[in-house]
Amino acid sequence: MATTNYSAAGLKEPEDHAGVLCETLSGLAGGTIAAPVNASREFFVEHMAPWMGRLFRDLERANFADFYARVGVLGRTLVDIEIEALALPA
């Protein structure tokens, strides 16, 4: 996991917060952040599932920047897949 110095003062936009959450989830899922077995699942459910889909849907409608619209499509798709996977029987 890349080490990035995020100061509280620098995290003013939802996109910044989303980036930190995605990086943290990556570390939990990939094992670079030591945590219990279900930590990535619990982290996603608690901190990402409630609002990240809405953020990515908003980015999809970003008429000002084609790049962010594409990021929105990808992010929303990944969040939707993860939510559906969590609903599957264990």
Image (tube, rainbow, N blue to C red):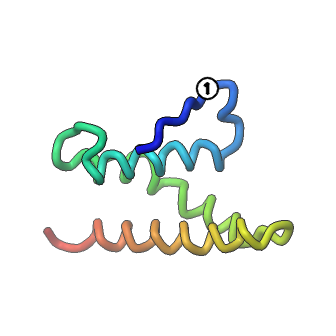
The quarter of the picture where the N terminus appears is top left
Residue that mark 1 sits on: 7
Residue 68: x and y, percent? 71, 66
Q: Residues within 10 Å of mark 1 (few under 14, many from 20)?
A: few
Residue at 55% in and 72% down: 74
Which residue is at the far right? 64
Q: Is residue 62 left or right of residue 26?
A: right
The quarter of the picture where the C terminus appears is bottom left
Residue at 47% in and 36% down: 3
Residue 70: x and y, percent? 66, 73
Which residue is at the far left? 90
33 or 81: nearer the viewer: 33
**Vertical placement of residue 32 versus 30, above or below:** above
Assign a secondary structure to mark 1. Answer: loop
Q: Amino acid at mark 1?
A: Ser
Residue at 29% in and 52% down: 30
Residue at 29% in and 43% down: 32
10 or 42: nearer the viewer: 10
Residue 29: x and y, percent? 29, 53
Residue 53: x and y, percent? 54, 63
**Vertical placement of residue 59 versus 47, above or below:** below
